[in-house]
Image: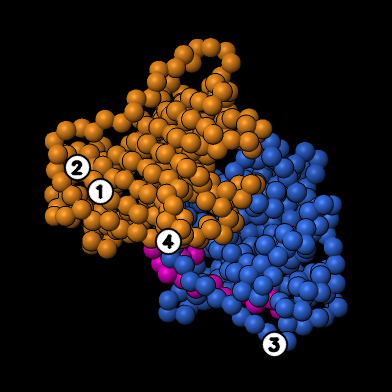
Chain colours: A orange, B blue
Amino acid sequence: MSVQDYSETFTVPFYECDAAGTLHLSALMNHLVLCSEQQLTSLDVGPKFMLSLGMGWVTTQYQIEITRLPQLHEQVRVVTRATQYNKFFCYRDFWLYDDQDNELAFVRSVWVVISFATRKMVHLPEVLTAKIASEFKPEVVRFPRIPKVDWTKADNLNKVFRVRYFDIDTNHHVNNAHYFDWMLDSLPLAFLKSHTVKSMSIKYDNEVTYGDEIVSRAQLNELTSHHQIRNGEQLAAEATITWQ
Amino acid sequence: MSVQDYSETFTVPFYECDAAGTLHLSALMNHLVLCSEQQLTSLDVGPKFMLSLGMGWVTTQYQIEITRLPQLHEQVRVVTRATQYNKFFCYRDFWLYDDQDNELAFVRSVWVVISFATRKMVHLPEVLTAKIASEFKPEVVRFPRIPKVDWTKADNLNKVFRVRYFDIDTNHHVNNAHYFDWMLDSLPLAFLKSHTVKSMSIKYDNEVTYGDEIVSRAQLNELTSHHQIRNGEQLAAEATITWQ
């Protein structure tokens, strides 16, 4: 089956923008995932079909490169393509373009399918891979490693977030996009106001659930920040961001 | 000038739904406001024009009646109409319909225009009212009163929320929609899972700003809940909700 691209346009609404009128990173990621969901729906293997299998897609990793995030009222276009898959992992790329076809962002992602009954990952069902993926390649694609950081130092930035009712999505877990807000919100206001994300590697390790009090901790070294979401003793997610 | 209706359709995306696959009330309110913004833009008095005046629209009150909130992937239609105005207040109604033209929600709202320089309300500029409002009527339209509640009782439900960087919108204040999440999230999980909002009166009193720690306090009596958002000694917003 040949590689299939799928695209959607959207106009950036006020409620997805920060004080500078720039699209939230979390909102961008929601729109990317929505575009891939719509591609799957167009191939008759969308969320309803997944539900009938008792399964759902979960992202485990993103590698994000941003030229600029779009502005309030700007019309932009998302393009997505499932690039390759193996027994457990499906790899998918996303591009964001402005209305002059300038590339605003490029995102690589890793997806797995979980069983709702066990919350554990399963082999990618052939009924899916036959439709969505361009090519089976047995190897695991390497993403940039998130560097080890010494979190025992005293100068970590820390903010506590309680997982709210409205953070939980229809997959009964926290929508991945919230992790972006938790991570970025832990940085100082003055820094957030004067810098934008240039690149970000994020890896999801363990689910968090309603009522959990998670700690978003960060270290900021000039134009690089390191992030962890801790849920008690457990690592929920980690990331590295470079800023411009 | 005759009454003008304006409508927009949207499809409910996964990232605006709760675990039951129902649209968040806060997301509905965002879509309503977006629809009125698009009407104003179509009349050449949209947000860019307001910015050129150094002014912005702010909601002070909503009266919300809900038959049902739409479900994930459902296509719905918002209709809005500015019904009347006086020297300071513009009144606007909204309707939400499903694809069979069944009414899902009806919302009345009160709007004022603030100066960004002073953050205080100003007379509605005639350049706006000439375009948007059907009729000048000097009287102040009465909305249902939010009942006085004895908050000194010990059995209040309380949750603390810190105003986050991404809660602040391009008007440099907290997007009104967040108040819905703060208020509802203060109620017990089991109640939220088994009930939906039937009607809600909400009134905004004072702005909150980045970093503020607000208390969302509630009293729940069978199918009615009372809510206040307190910012220290100050009342930020209050509401009454009936549930079904």
What residue is shown at x 43% (from left), y 65% (from top)? Answer: B11
Kind of residue at badge 4? Thr
Residue B21 relative to residue B171: left or right: left
Q: Are marks 1 and 4 in contact (CB under 8 Å)?
A: no
Marks 4 and 2: same chain?
A: yes
Query: Which chain is home to disc 1?
Result: A
Kind of residue at badge 3? Ser
**Residue at image mark 4:** A9
Range covered by the magenta-colored residues = B69-83
What residue is shown at x 59% (from left), y 35% (from top)? Answer: A195
Is A186 magenta? The answer is no
Q: Quadrant of the C terminus of chain A?
A: top right
Q: Are marks 2 and 1 in contact (CB under 8 Å)?
A: yes
Kind of residue at badge 2? Tyr
Q: In this orientation, which residue lies closer to the viewer: A202 or A166?
A: A202
Helix, strand or loop at label 4? It is: strand
Is B74 magenta? The answer is yes
Pointer 4 local density, CA inside 10 Å: few below 14, some 14–19, many at least 20: some
Query: Which chain is home to disc 4?
Result: A
Pointer 3 local density, CA inside 10 Å: few below 14, some 14–19, many at least 20: few
Pointer 1 local density, CA inside 10 Å: few below 14, some 14–19, many at least 20: many
**Residue at image mark 2:** A85
Marks 3 and 4 sit apart, C-alpha to C-alpha, by: 34 Å
Kind of residue at badge 1? Ala
